[in-house]
Amino acid sequence: MSYLFRKNNNRIKYADLHLHTNQSDGKLPPEKVVAEANRAGLSTIAITDHDILDGIESALSAGKKHNVDVIPGLELSAENNGEEIHILGFFIDKNNRQLQERLDELREIRYDRALKMMDKLRKMGVVIELSDVFEQTSEKYIGRPHLAAVLVKKGYANTMSEAFQRFLGNHAPAYMPKEAFSPSDAIKMILDANGIPVLAHPGMSINNILDKLIAHGLMGIEAFHPYHTSALSDYYCNIAKDRNLLITGGSDFHGFENSRKSLGSVKLPYEYVEKLKNYINFR
């Protein structure tokens, strides 16, 4: 499959390869995200919603309208020895039936997890209903941010951050761990859908698992992220070069106010997009 990118010689080209829409836990619809990307001066973006591809088609259509190239992607959440590991997939075949079936299973797991967390909240005297949650999201995707938004709306917390700290964070009383899903499983799902698997916003413990992930087919590292200092980004870039991995970066935009993850806060030089594209076209 060949991906052709429009050229615009009137401006320096930048990309943001980590964006979420309201199809998962973002605030804005896909077409609005694309419009905002155009206003931010981006030539290329990747829509990387959690466990769902439903926003890709709208984003691709909006990309034609706003002269923004859209890479179809997703983000999968996995777990390794109690540590959450996120794997991004780029140039995903959105019509891959096996992938869609597996994503449906993962969303069912998310739904059941949300119900269990709501039950824990109820036992604490913190009552929210599914009808409240569905005002924040569709029935296709429920994540902790949606529960947090309801907690804020109902006055149980003043901010999303407080809702996580008091109720939903990894060490908070209403937290429920996810069903075991390994990073190697996530990588295989992406590879089977002809995508490029990339380790998202890596932690400093990367060296403990990186070689194992590479052995299972990992192809890149998200070196540039709002939570990475310049020194940390350089560190990850050097690791990527040492291990012959692709380098990506993105804002991890969700559309919420007062967030460091604003759209375009990471402007990835286009040379890194070219390397992704070259790999896809060569394959």
Image (tube, grey):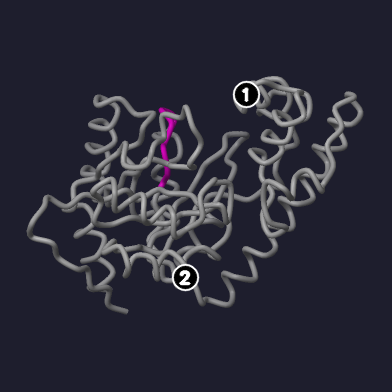
Residue 245 shows up from this direction: no
Dot 1 amino acid type: Thr
Q: Nearer the viewer, residue 59 or 229?
A: 59
**Which quarter of the rendering shows the C terminus?**
bottom left
Q: Residues within 10 Å of mark 2 (few under 14, many from 20)?
A: some
Which of the image's four quarters has the N terminus?
A: bottom left
Task: Give percent across and percent down for residue 181.
Answer: 63, 50
At x 70% / y 43%, what residue is drawn? 178
Q: State yes or no: residue 203 in magenta.
A: yes
Element carrying mark 2: helix
Q: Is residue 227 above or below residue 158?
A: below
- For marks 2 and 1, the one nearer the N-term is 2
Q: Can the viewer see residue 246?
A: yes
- Of residues 164 and 230, the one drawn nearer to the viewer in this rendering: 164
Q: Is residue 107 left or right of residue 38?
A: right
The magenta stretch spans which residues? 199-205
Q: Residue at x 84, y 30 (%)?
A: 121
Which label is found at residue 159? Answer: 1
Image position, residue 99 (x, y; %): 57, 69
Q: Residue 57 bears which disc, if any?
A: 2
Q: Is residue 133 magenta?
A: no
- State left or right for residue 216 relative to residue 267: right
